[in-house]
Image (spheres, rainbow, N blue to C red):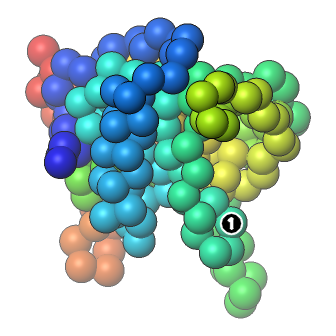
Amino acid sequence: MRKIVFYPNEILRVKTRDIKSIDEMLQADVDELRWALQKEKDHAAGLAAVQVGLDRRFFGLVTGQKRNLQIFINPRVIKTFGQKLHPIMTFDDGKQEDFLEGCLSFPGLFGTVNRYLRIEAEWEEIKGKKLETRNKKLEGIEAIAYQHELDHLNGILFIDHIKEEGGELYMWEGDKKKRVDLNLVVEKEK
């Protein structure tokens, strides 16, 4: 079984091509990703094929309150609603805090990323021997995770957004977050 690849592995910068047909290899690759994401289910909202070393255009998301695992083949965003912004979490006591996006390919690192909080997504699913198109409006964490994983399929990483937007990067030390110099992380890729 494949393991998650870590930054700065070159495959994380691959722009994948659309999948045109279903074959045994695609089904095996989907099963590999499903296994890897199932293993990380409590720590991850999603996982892209490139994150397990596969140059394939699909990802998996853990969705809904039941935390079901869904595979999205040839995903795209067909419509966005509102402006891209940095999500803020509001707790039951009214306290607010930055939503910090993480990535399994960057263990222990989290950062502030601007995302659309509502999108209309389109993708394909395997139905028998065919690919069938689906679409759905996604909101909140599902919309954020969908955009994050779609970025992976285009060779874009969450640190790219942080750098471009002037966001912050952190790591956790116990129950406190410590700011990390993004330039030191990006330097690894050179």
Does residue 44 appear to the left or right of 187 in the view shown? right
| In the rendered image, the vertical position of residue 132 relative to residue 96, given as above or below | above
Q: Position of residue 144 (x, y in %)?
A: 63, 46
Q: Residue at x 59, y 64 (%)?
A: 68
Position of residue 140 measured from the top left corner of the image (x, y, whole percent): 73, 55
Quadrant of residue 35 within the rendered picture: bottom left
Residue where numbered disc 1 is placed: 64
Q: Residue at x 44, y 23 (%)?
A: 23
In the displayed structure image, the side of residue 53 where residue 131 appears, left or right? right
Look at 31% across and 45% down and name the residue there: 32
Location of residue 21 (image quadrant): top right
Could you tell me if residue 119 is visible in this image? Answer: yes
Rendered view: 39 above or below 8: below
Q: How many marks?
A: 1
Nearest the eye: 75 or 92: 75
Hey, which quadrant is residue 97 in on the image?
Answer: bottom right
53 with respect to 153 (left or right)? left
Q: Quarter of the image containing the C terminus?
A: top left
Q: Residue furthest front?
A: 129
Up-down: is 166 above or below 100?
Answer: above
Q: What amino acid is found at the position of numbered circle 1 in the picture? A: Gly
Q: Residues within 10 Å of mark 1 (few under 14, many from 20)?
A: few
Q: Is residue 96 visible?
A: no
SS state under label 1? loop
Q: Nearer the viewer, residue 117 or 35?
A: 35
Please tell me which residue is depicted at 32% across the width and 74% down the height of the picture.
176
Q: Relative to 152, is 100 above or below?
A: below
Q: Nearer the viewer, residue 114 or 139?
A: 139
Q: Residue 83, how many percent across, how many down? A: 81, 33
Query: Residue 145 at what x, y percent from top left?
Result: 57, 47
